[in-house]
Image (spheres, helix red, strand yellow):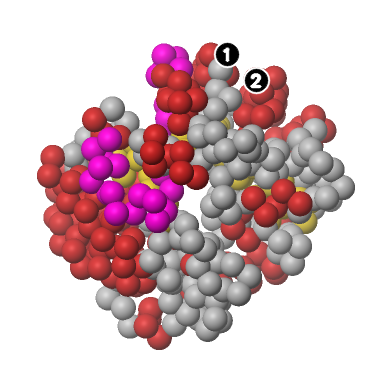
Amino acid sequence: MPMKYAHSFPLLIKPVSADCNLRCPYCFYLDHMSFYPDQSKHRMSDETLNQLVSSYMATNQPVYTFIWQGGEPTLLGLEFFRKVTSLQQKYGKQGAGVSNSLQTNATLITDELAQHFAQYRFLVGVSLDGPPNIHNRYRRYPDGKGSYSDVKKAISCLRRHRVDFNILTLVTEANVNRARELYRYFSDQGLLFQQYIPCVGFDVDGHLQPYSISGKAWGLFLCQLFDEWRLRDTRRVSIRLFDSIIQKLVFGRPADCNMDNDCRKYFVVEYNGDVYPCDFFVSHELKLGNIFTDSWEKLVNSPVYKEFGTRKSALSDACNNCEYLAFCNGDCPRRRTVKKGLHASPSVLCAGWRLFFKHSFSEFERLAAEIKTELGPVIPTEKI
């Protein structure tokens, strides 16, 4: 009988570890290219893939959620993803729901790969930072060549095969002052599913990296983005952060882990089966186990995993007294300032979040009220 768990757990899988055909300076996983030094090339073996799919699909999940990331997961090519869907069919129980999503730089997308993604309903996230002059600032090949033209070809390919995809944009110092331009650029091309991620990286001394943005700049970016969106696109364009705020207001639970009060949202599985609590916190100290030696029950109940989950709620006094705490919960722990203690300091983006919520919150409440009226009585989702 499948083991029952207190809550479902998606898998965020790194089948090539940090290996990638691009060299984006801001990539948070770039340092992990030397994390497994025994091998120069990291590829998930057939044995590991089989163990991953079979063990996970033996658990009791409402939907079996596989999130393929990297590095660049498409380095493995079509044959790997054929094996993925074949194993999911082999081990899936009758009536079980399976969800596959993939985050990619899109430079290796082929017609055959797109056909497979369409056939098995993969949701593909395409990394695109804006028009060529912005995108190519950081998203480059090892020889320095920008990747924009290849990404645009891939988007045409995905559209041709009717693959569901969205756009993921990293907001850096290169585009943080151009929110309106970015939004119009994407929306005018029919790229209506958008996600914006603030770029915050620290050096070894705890100082922000040059490509990082300030809290105030992030807040102004979101305010401009929101003003463009609310004019005419609240029911046409999906912006993940905005959707998550509305979901929190309507259903009581956000879709974005940054807004939640517990960090135990998924497991990261590396190419060799090693398991970690979060891809921003892959370290030897936070290794939970390995899928060959540890059951999912043991991993879920790991003391290290439980301790990691509590990091989100170790808040500063400023956070505990903030009127927007329920919609931020201190932001992701990786953005909390290092010099005062990682888990007890406000996020470096705190000023920006406050600026944005003060600017937009009443309008979000109005939109949520409209949706509640349309839906009728809503039963709040169960709290983890």
Residue 359 rendering spot, x and y as whole percentages: 18, 64
Q: Is residue 372 left or right of residue 354?
A: left
Residue 79 rendering spot, x and y as whole percentages: 69, 19
Choose the circle earlier in sequence order: 2 or 1: 2
Residue at 61 percent of width and 42 percent of height: 23
Tag 2's secondary structure? Answer: helix
Q: Are marks 2 and 1 in contact (CB under 8 Å)?
A: yes
Residue 322 rendering spot, x and y as whole percentages: 31, 78
The circle drawn on residue 78 is: 2
Q: Quadrant of the N terminus?
A: top right
- Mark 2 neighbour density, 10 Å: few (under 14) some (14–19) many (20 or more): some
Tag 1's secondary structure? Answer: helix
Against 346, residue 188 (above or below) is above
Q: Is residue 49 magenta?
A: no
Point out the stretch of residues depicted in magenta.
Answer: 157-185
Quadrant assignment, res 43: top right
- Mark 1 neighbour density, 10 Å: few (under 14) some (14–19) many (20 or more): few
Residue at 43 percent of width and 71 percent of height: 348
The circle drawn on residue 112 is: 1
Q: Amino acid at mark 2?
A: Leu
Q: Amino acid at mark 1?
A: Glu
Query: Can residue 61 be seen from the camera position used here?
Result: no
